[in-house]
Amino acid sequence: MLMHFNNKSSVYPNRSGYKPEVNEQYAQSLIPVADNLLGLLSSGLGLEDGDIKQGLGGEDLVYMLKINYYPPCPCPELALGVAPHTDMSSITILVPNEVQGLQVFKDDVWYDVAYIPNALIIHIGDQVLSNGKYESVFHRTTVNKDKTRMSWPMFLEPPAEFEVGPIPKLISEDNPPKYKTKKFKDYVYCKLNKLP
């Protein structure tokens, strides 16, 4: 298991009372939640509980916590916090603050994701492992004119050198692979550069 944190003071907004160790504790507390979600996703595909986690690198799975900070924007209709995309991670576990900003795209319409206190938002990321049986969540982030929006996503992804592809148990003559097996770093490179 690898956890990524960046606690350099230059990365965080300069706010008195900020405690990086709280983010680390938060991330640690999400690991069992993440492992449980991966088990449920495996079961949903008719697989053993650990199959998706193994397909992501097993105990070498990377849990990456980021902190998104969106300051108030005087013209929110002219800016996006994050452009429309799907996550490259297998799943993303997200906690936002109470300021609206996350939107998902469905049936040619952008929908606001309601803020529910104490709730986690789960994004299904790019689904190479499921061979497309799970659909990635296409989403974006907007900004607010008057309020700061923050979110704390944890991305679950394979190590860079780990080869990812459809889980062999999900491949058959009737269901051939929809994705090539490649190292995760190569998958990221291809996606970012819009290559097959």
Image: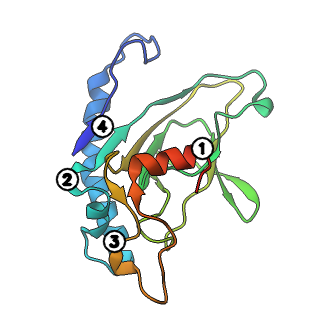
Q: Amino acid at mark 2?
A: Glu
Residue wearing tag 2: 59
Observer-nearest residue: 163 or 104? 163
Q: Badge 4: few (under 14), some or many (20 or more) residues near its Cα, within 10 Å?
A: few
Observer-nearest residue: 86 or 153? 86
Q: Is residue 20 left or right of residue 95?
A: left
Q: Amino acid at mark 3?
A: Ser
| Secondary structure under the numbered disc 1 in the rendered image | loop
Residue wearing tag 4: 26
* Mark 4 → mark 3, Cα distance in angstroms: 25 Å
| Residue 132 percent coordinates (x, y) | 51, 70
Q: Amino acid at mark 1?
A: Asn
Q: Is residue 110 left or right of residue 134?
A: right
Give the number of the mark in front: 1 or 2: 1
Please determine whether, in this image, residue 26 is positioned above or below residue 175: above
Residue wearing tag 1: 193
Task: Say which mark, if any, is on residue 139.
Answer: none
The image quadrant where one finds the C terminus is bottom right
Give the number of the mark in front: 3 or 2: 2
Q: Amino acid at mark 4?
A: Tyr
Mark 3 or 2, nearer chain start:
3
Please determine whether, in this image, residue 151 is positioned above or below residue 1: above
Mark 4 or 3, nearer chain start:
4
| Secondary structure under the numbered disc 4 in the rendered image | helix
Q: Is residue 8 left or right of residue 54?
A: right
* Mark 1 → mark 3, Cα distance in angstroms: 30 Å
Mark 1 or 3, nearer chain start:
3
Residue wearing tag 3: 42
Q: Badge 3: few (under 14), some or many (20 or more) residues near its Cα, within 10 Å?
A: some
